[in-house]
Image (cartoon, rainbow, N blue to C red):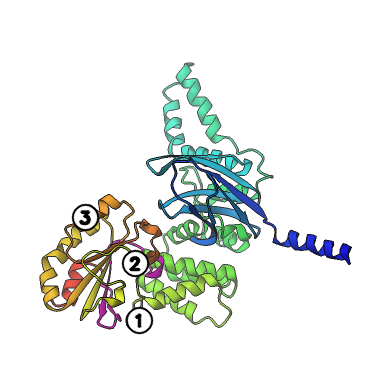
Amino acid sequence: MKKIFGILCLMMVSTTSAQFKVHIEAPASFAPKEVYLYTLNGSKDLLNTKEIRKGNSWQINVAQPYRGMMKLYFPEENVTINFISENKDVQLKFATAEGKITDVQYLDESNEMMNNLQDVLQKKELILPALSQMKGYYKGKSDFGNAIDKEIARLSSSSGDLSKFPFVNFYTTNYAKYLDKSATKSNLTHAEIITFLSKSNEMLESSSLLRPILIAYLNIGPSTNVSADIDTLLTAVDVETPRGQTVLSELIEIFDAYDMKELKDKYLTQAKNLKCTINERLSATIAINKNIELGATFLNHVFKNPTNTSAKTLSEVKAAKKVIIFWSSTCSHCEAELPTFIENYKKMRAQNIQVIALSLDNDKEAYENKVKGLPWINDTELKGWNSSYVEQYNVHATPTYFVLDADNKIIAKPDHAVDVISFLKLN
């Protein structure tokens, strides 16, 4: 029995041990204690795990196999670090200045390779065309001319043997084929992209390539019928499969972000009418859009550091109507539109209408300086686009407006400040 028990123990250890570990070293001056680790699904970050600092480092055990993009998020400072996983141990350290990360050193082989290739790729896109033009002015031998030739050769060379790095190979190969903006590259076709999206393995979802390649598909033209092109794509990837549903979800969100309402409504309706099992990604897209439909009850928000109110939550604010504004102190469109509310605020209060502005700022000083002049209720998490209400209320741009009734039902989603004022009959 002892031998059997020993074998069972070994089996339990092997099934619960980590696939790989992520080791992070930080300077002693870096204050955050907690770090979140995210994986990627299409364009969505998925929380994998959290870890508390021990000394000046974190060690995170990743339980499930994973090859693809990953992200570390330090919520106390609202800073992130991006890296990759080849389902092998990751090691990195970083330097900071004034609480901000200034330099990241990737110490494992996979991330060192990816970082070097990314550096070459960026220079290839931005610098190589200029170097090729300059070369024509240095036909004779000179130190500078030779240096140009050497750099052109380096940036034009192949990336070497990537057989040890399946994800790096997948990412760099397909980025070069589908997203590289080289002037000499042949034009893509819908058929090429459809084949890629249909045949790729699971690294497509974890690569960050899916959304930009879908945008590239939509931009291939001229097309007389974009909807027909999309239908062809969705038929090929099969919306009754997880891949097809993730593609459908991405398309709905692209149409939402680019204010393509007719296309968004068509494919959101298609998603709602599916009779098969729906994956988590598409389910979330359907749910968030249902939550912000006209007539839906606006999800409650717990205030963090509100101004001009004693209410603890949005639902505790009592008013005949509420105007919700998602904005930022660094948003030029917000800067142009907020004065409209300031000019009309006394009229609004006279009619028991309250403004609640939720900021996507991450700079505390900039936010506090701005809200000194804003008389309505203000709140922020100081997490920028990592704020919880970005996902909760499907915010793609600032400013974004909602008008609620006394029961927090959504009664309007105006596009601009003047539209809000017009809806409220204040002009």
Label 1 crowd bin: few (<14), some (14–19), many (20+), radius 10 Å: some
The answer to whether residue 387 is left or right of residue 331 is right
**Residue 139 in view (yes/no):** no
Say which residue label 2 marks: 259
Q: Residue at x 23, y 75 (%)?
A: 322
Residue 296: which disc?
A: 1
Q: Earlier in the sequence, mark 3 or mark 2?
A: 2
Q: Secondary structure at mark 3?
A: helix
Is 311 situated above or below 296? above
Label 3 crowd bin: few (<14), some (14–19), many (20+), radius 10 Å: few
The answer to whether residue 293 is left or right of residue 216 is left
Quadrant occupied by the N terminus: bottom right
Instruction: Estimate the x, y position of residue 130 in percent, counting from the top left.
Output: 42, 33
Question: Which amino acid does the dot numbered 2 rest on?
Answer: Asp
Label 2 crowd bin: few (<14), some (14–19), many (20+), radius 10 Å: few
Q: Are marks 3 and 2 in contact (CB under 8 Å)?
A: no
Question: Which amino acid does the dot numbered 3 rest on?
Answer: Lys
Q: Nearer the viewer, mark 3 or mark 2?
A: 3
Residue 30 covered by magenta stretch: no
Span highlighted in magenta in the image: 391-414
Instruction: Estimate the x, y position of residue 192 in percent, counting from the top left.
Output: 56, 58
Question: Which amino acid does the dot numbered 1 rest on?
Answer: Ala
Say which residue label 3 marks: 370
Q: Secondary structure at mark 1?
A: loop
Instruction: Estimate the x, y position of residue 196 in percent, counting from the top left.
Output: 59, 59
Q: Secondary structure at mark 2?
A: loop
